[in-house]
Amino acid sequence: MAKDKKIADESPFLNRELSWIEFNFRVMQQAEDAALPPLERLKFAAITASNADEFFMVRVGGLKLLQRQGEERPDPSGRTPSEQLAEISARMHELVERQHACLAKEIEPALRKGGLRRLRMEDLSAAQLRHVETLFADSIFPVITPVAVAPDGEFPLLAGLGLALYVRLAGASEAEGSRHAIVAVPKGLARFLTLPGEAGFAYVLVEEVIRACAGSLFPGVEVRECAAFRLTRNADMSVRDDLADDLMEQMREVLVERKESDCVRLEIEKRASKEAQAFLRAALRVDDADVYAVPGPLDLAAFFRLANLAGTDALKIEPWAPQAVPEAPAAESAFDVLKRGNLLLFHPYESYDPVLRLLQEAADDPNVLAIKQVLYRVSDNSPVVAALMRAAERGKHVTALIELKARFDEARNIDWADALARAGAQVIYGVKGYKTHAKVCVVVRREPEGVARYVHYGTGNYNEKSARLYSDVSFMTRLEDYGADASAFFNALTGYSQLAKFRKIEAAPLGIRPRLLEWIGNEAERSRQGEEAGIEAKMNSLADPELIEALYKASQAGVPIRLNVRGICCLRPGVKGLSENVSVISVVDRYLEHARIFRFRNGGAPALFISSADWMPRNLDRRIELMVPVEDPPSAGKLAQILETCLADTQQSWKLLADGAYERRRPDARHPALRCQETFQQRAAARAAEAAQQQAPVFEPQRPAEQKKQA
């Protein structure tokens, strides 16, 4: 990372946007790791592209709006929106070059050796050409529509992140010059077209086929150029739900607005002519700095699909299966498991099945009276939603708070809200003025000793698919205090009451920030008094100035602070007189690090918490979030071990330096070689194997009666 300018060097805060870009570069280093199989490397390259798409839609889009409004107040790092945009452009252009250099020089050659080949039109055999021409005539030509565009005419409305082709045509006369047309590539068309007659799997990109057959779209007119391009639209817009009478309808309007919003990035093939680039820049009103001439295929994020191709196991990493949880045998009811004690799960190393089983059993159990749950992001064919619908249809009281403002999941959540309402559930569309990001479910059950509440608190969404890809913590309990808090939480959200004073948990926007500041301040005071003090925390992002300043004060009081921050970190560690007692690492490995775990040493009686919230202003001030203490010794011990192992990683972690750069962490005499994700998988597998062995039947030979008598 280039050294910050002077004003930024004087700030105690790193820039949020540049810190996020550094995270994406750490992901890119995974794609550049020659020790990984080529499809795993391709997957990481695709992730960097997908991350960049969302970054431009949201973060760059927001900065563009500020710039257009003339709002040039500096951020905590000392940069104005215009200065941030300039630095973002320079760094993101560098990322594009690295992505495609790695793809062309390393990943695709390795894939070709393994039998997975991307061919260009000039590489095709005569038989393959005939196959492609037939495919174009039968399946592509009928669904694409060329649209003529005059230089000063109306430009066609193109979907953000969709592929399109710019076509330059000969004019009717030499005096007329070039004419222009746009061909949008419908999202329903397959991007990767399989080719016959090749060993392994060979494919050609759909845009290459359209380019080669473009003449048939413009009969009698010379096609002089055909260049693929892709635009990114600003998605940083939201509904004023505090003024909305019909939130669902306004969310639908936001989805429409995104389709027509300003272009914030134009990607175009590097081989496109200057005339093509100039025409598109003018038509889309894009600045030069926002044009990305891509030296390879566009929409690298789409290549993630190749990672799931059947028959390519030799090109992939060996899968790690989620392991059975010894404390929650599949044959035992989830209710019986939680009657026996609390359950703390670490996904995806440990199976997500106990969470699903609780909901599915609750839907069918005649003794269950009610289910209440917050849904932020769920899967397309969600078994969670299916269980809630089944419960509602069977007459149970089901309350589902579905967050319609979950960015890029709005359309799916609208559909699920409709389906649940039709099934008879009580559906709440979030809370006015806030996003509800908490992860909580409570099942109310009638039992011989009275009504009991079974609660799940988590750090991740109720999505069984991402539970196999993200590392998250689930805490399941039947304890009365946690159940009472869950009920009070839902009552506050679904009624008009304020968030209550809870027995155990804390909730944002009112409770989490003050509680964290209190704990950080207590550690500072304990250190001054010579007591045991220390702060360890794991989170996705750290950007809140007030909490960062509190950590600086604790460091100055002598508190050792160890942080594991996956992505954005605006804290400068290791600065003399400011943060010399703070260290920050970031782990990037097979799974996306997503769990939030906090520990305060508390004079030798450690306090541990899990949370749905990162330490960012949006989470602490503008979202409904939860922070949950984990106190019973088995669960707390397991959680502490998870946190310590994450902080001890020396093989897949990077150390944050004071200037915002990251350096790869390496084992040494004080820090032995340890890869935390591999360690977690080994531990989970060992526990599952030990439990299976203990449950294995013992065979006793059946002896004849006479032998038994003699014995």
Image (cartoon, helix red, strand yellow):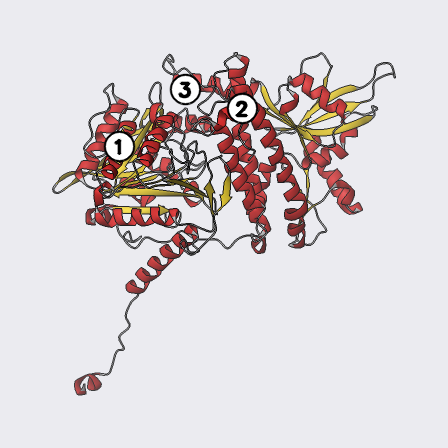
Asked whether residue 381 is in view, the answer is yes
First in residue order: circle 2 vs circle 1: 2
**Secondary structure at numbered mark 3:** helix
| Label 3: how many Cα within 10 Å (few below 14, some 14–19, many 20+) | many
In front: mark 2 or mark 1? Answer: 1
First in residue order: circle 3 vs circle 2: 2
Per the rendering, the mark at residue 66 is none
The percent position of residue 707, horizontal first and vertical second, equals: 21, 86
Q: Which residue is mark 1?
A: 521
Q: Is residue 606 left or right of residue 433?
A: left
Who is closer to the viewer here, 220 or 612? 612
Q: Identify the amino acid type marked 1.
A: Gly
Who is closer to the viewer here, 40 or 422? 40
The percent position of residue 203, horizontal first and vertical second, equals: 68, 44
Q: Identify the amino acid type marked 3.
A: Met
First in residue order: circle 1 vs circle 3: 3
Q: Is residue 325 left or right of residue 192?
A: left
Could you say which quadrant of the image residue 565 lies in? top left
Q: Which residue is mark 3?
A: 248
Per the rendering, the mark at residue 84 is 2
Who is closer to the viewer here, 413 or 286? 286
